[in-house]
Image (spheres, rainbow, N blue to C red):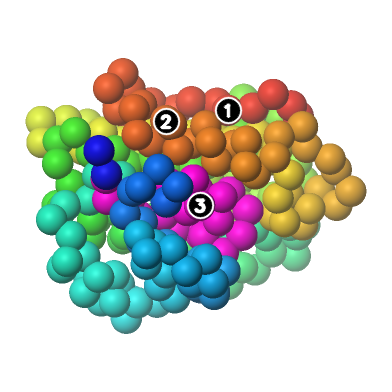
Amino acid sequence: MSKYIIITGTSRGIGFELVKQFAAEGHQVLALSRNNKPCADLNLPNVTSLSFDLGNSEDYKKVAECLEDWSSVDVLINNAGRLLNKPFLETSPEDFKAVYEVNVFGVAELTRMVQPRMPKTGHVVTISSMGGVQGSMKFPGLSAYSSSKAAVITLTELWAEEFKETGPSFNVLALGAVQTEMLEEAFPGYQAPTTANQMAAYIKDFALTGQTLYNGKLLQVSNSTP
């Protein structure tokens, strides 16, 4: 059965692979990214590619207009992320704000906008990082990034509690190393054991079925360090 899917951060990496995989199964996909060209160039009839910046309040109006044609939203995948690899003493308040604008405030605002359109059986999946998990191995230079990824873990738990009667379900996946452009930026030269395509396949299946068994849960999806 075809579902209505929203995915952020779709210009590359895991997000781009998710769009292709959901579309291949016949689902309707709204692909949101600052650079919408990669998904637009796919020329898939069931994919709408929209230029969207999580930190731009005007862009949310464009999303709302697109959703007027949808009866509901079955799945929201908060995949977009902003990375900063910089020593803490060199990290300014503006640096922190820029990271949190995307990784926390943007995730919260898009979720707030989409939640009323979702059925009880819907599923909001937010992509976090192993670096945001309490007690996990931490790496210097990632103060803003990893702390922002910790914030969305707690947000997910709060949302699940607040909407436990009406739905949808909320879960968060803390990913380990995946071979993407962002990983190369954080850990130059490191070769991850998992490809973007492999991780996207896992996230796709979890987004479609995970809400039947999980709500308000953090799942650590990692087979390596980092």
Q: Quadrant of residue 222?
A: top right
Mark 2 or 3: in front is 3
Q: Which residue is mark 2?
A: 206
Q: Return the residue nearer the eye: 104 or 35.
A: 35
Instruction: Tell us which disc is closer to us: 3 or 1.
Output: 3
> Residue drawn at (44%, 75%), measured in percent from left and top?
51
Three-letter amino acid code at disc 3? Lys
Q: Which residue is mark 1?
A: 221
Query: CB atoms at circles 2 and 1 under 8 Å apart?
Result: no
Q: Residue 226's spot in the image, x, y percent?
A: 75, 34
On screen, 60 above or below 168? below
Q: Amino acid at mark 2?
A: Phe
Taking the view exactly as shown, the residue that stands out farthest to the top is 213
Give me the disc on residue 20.
3
Q: Residue furthest bottom?
A: 58
**Badge 1 density bin: few <14, some 14–19, many ≥20, Cα 10 Å:** some
Relative placement, left or right, of 138 versus 202 is right
Q: Is residue 144 magenta?
A: no
The boundaries of the magenta stretch are: 3-22
Q: Is residue 49 above or below residue 148?
A: below
